[in-house]
Image (tube, rainbow, N blue to C red):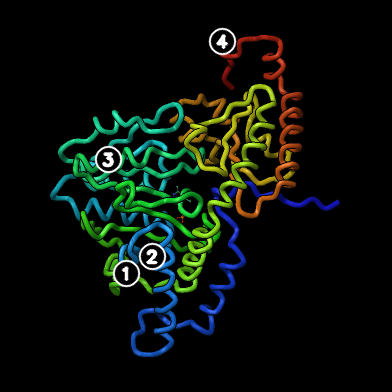
């Protein structure tokens, strides 16, 4: 029997919805003009497609279409927001506050900003992955210009207290930027309702194509400006030069329209499936859910299976189930996830974690198969493990002195 591959890694990327693909197709050939060509119908048609997409995107997040800048994805949007604000507001201050659990696109941009003379505070999170509001407020100084806090975490699905953070930023007159890549299109995300002034997101995490994203930049009260990081023809009101990716943008627009209509229904269905997966897997001994379970994305769970390696567990699926482990492959070794470490997990629990992220095309049958394969895989791995045997014999593993090789 040929087994079907099961995709539970939707936080890494989602498949493109066929309805999105259909909407994009004409823009590769029949309507293949440059949206910046103002003097012939080919350009007008492309421009119309982009204008319509801009409305679809703006509608989903409740902003004006004039506040949307199209980019190549969330990485570029994060770079533009952080570096763009840093350069634009230099005279006002040079201090940025962010979290240790942010995506690398934010952390590495901050790193670069420090090299350019900026000051960055990387706040710890609490054991549940959320920021402590008092610590955030205490970190704000007279030179703080920006607070950058992600809406939902990619590894744990944990959602930050956005409204409360927005109030603190408002009170101290600092800008609030959010990487909302994991939240937009999955749960209602309205930046203006929570005082977010800049917001990054991407199409390929919400059933759109890869290589296209957007940055929301607030235009009124306050009027926010960013210094362009890409110079050239002055596209996107001078904030992001480069010929627009018309098919991609049209696809992002359609993905936003579908999300607007279907995300609540999807979220309700997926959270039921996620809860079933989670409660079945948690029947296995020594399993732990990572991150706050009350403030969490509906389709995500991150579980540690103590005393085994997530990477090893994944091998028992024989590549039939796609998930992510809490270990990142660096040049020579497996590094435990910095996000889970920031939650206070030890290296062992971080290495033993698996992230399951469901999506629009996940079925109940796939969840059944995943539960079965996971349960068998964990038992199999533990049966082979001397550490598990020691644990069952009652050895206090924390007190064992392991010899170094
Ligand atoms: C995927 C992701 C990104 C990067 O998005 P790209 O469009 O692939 O550049 C940034 N931030 C978060 C939280 C993500 O999950």
Cα separation, mark 2 vs mark 1, equals 7 Å
Cα separation, mark 3 vs mark 1, equals 30 Å
Tell me where residue 348 appears, x and y as whole percent.
Answer: 56, 25
Front-most of 38 and 183? 183
Cα separation, mark 3 vs mark 2, equals 28 Å
- Check disc 4: other Cα within 10 Å, few if <14, some if 14-19, many if 20+: few
Q: Dot 1 corresponds to which residue?
A: 236
> Which callout, 2 or 4, points to the residue nearer the camera?
2
SS at circle 3 = helix
Identify the residue at horizontal 60%, vertical 51% (top origin): 359
Q: Is residue 298 above or below residue 239?
A: above
Identify the residue at horizontal 56%, vertical 76% (top origin): 25
> Which callout, 4 or 1, points to the residue nearer the camera?
1
Q: Dot 2 corresponds to which residue?
A: 70
Q: Is residue 103 above or below residue 39?
A: above
Looking at mark 4, is its residue's CB closer than 8 Å to ligand 1? no
Identify the residue at horizontal 31%, vertical 31% (top origin): 133
Going from the N terminus, do you reach mark 3 or mark 1 first?
A: 3
Tell me where residue 332 appears, x and y as whole percent.
Answer: 55, 38
Write down the quadrant of residue 374 in the picture: top right
Going from the N terminus, do you reach mark 2 or mark 1 first?
A: 2
Going from the N terminus, do you reach mark 3 or mark 2 first?
A: 2
């Amino acid at each position: 029997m040929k087994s079907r591959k099961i995709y539970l890694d939707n936080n890494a990327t989602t498949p493109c919805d066929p309805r999105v693909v259909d909407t994009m197709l004409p823009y590769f050939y029949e309507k293949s003009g440059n949206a910046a060509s103002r003097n012939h119908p080919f350009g007008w048609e492309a421009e119309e497609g982009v204008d319509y997409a801009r409305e679809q995107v703006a509608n989903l997040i409740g902003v004006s279409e004039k506040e949307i800048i199209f980019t190549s994805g969330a990485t570029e949007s994060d770079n533009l927001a952080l570096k763009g604000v840093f350069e634009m507001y230099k005279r006002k201050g040079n201090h940025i506050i962010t979290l240790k659990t942010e995506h690398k696109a934010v952390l590495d941009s901050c790193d670069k900003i420090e090299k350019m003379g900026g000051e960055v505070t990387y706040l710890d999170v609490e054991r549940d992955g959320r920021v402590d509001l008092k610590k955030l407020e205490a970190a704000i100084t007279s030179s703080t210009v920006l607070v950058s806090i992600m809406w939902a975490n990619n590894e744990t699905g944990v959602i930050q207290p956005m409204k409360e953070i927005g109030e603190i930023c408002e009170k101290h007159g600092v800008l609030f930027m959010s990487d909302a890549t994991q939240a937009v299109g999955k749960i209602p995300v309205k930046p203006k309702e929570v005082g977010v002034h800049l917001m990054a997101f991407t199409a390929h995490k919400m059933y759109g194509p890869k290589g296209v994203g957007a940055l929301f930049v607030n235009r009124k009260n306050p009027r926010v400006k960013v210094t362009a990081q890409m110079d050239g023809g002055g596209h996107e009101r001078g904030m992001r030069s480069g010929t627009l990716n018309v098919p991609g943008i049209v696809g992002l627009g359609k993905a936003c329209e579908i999300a607007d209509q279907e995300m609540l229904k999807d979220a309700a269905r997926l959270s039921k499936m996620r809860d079933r997966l989670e409660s079945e897997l948690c029947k296995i001994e020594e399993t732990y859910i990572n991150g706050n379970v009350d403030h969490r994305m509906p389709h995500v769970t991150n579980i540690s299976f103590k005393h085994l390696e997530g990477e090893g567990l994944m091998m028992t699926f024989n590549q039939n189930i796609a998930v992510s482990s809490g270990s990142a492959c660096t040049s020579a070794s497996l590094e435990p996830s910095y996000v889970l470490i920031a939650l206070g997990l030890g290296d062992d629990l971080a290495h033993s974690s698996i992230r399951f992220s469901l999506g629009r095309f996940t079925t109940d049958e796939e969840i059944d198969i995943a539960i079965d394969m996971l349960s068998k895989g964990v038992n199999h791995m533990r049966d082979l493990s001397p550490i598990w045997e020691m644990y069952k014999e009652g050895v206090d593993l924390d007190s064992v002195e392991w010899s170094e090789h």
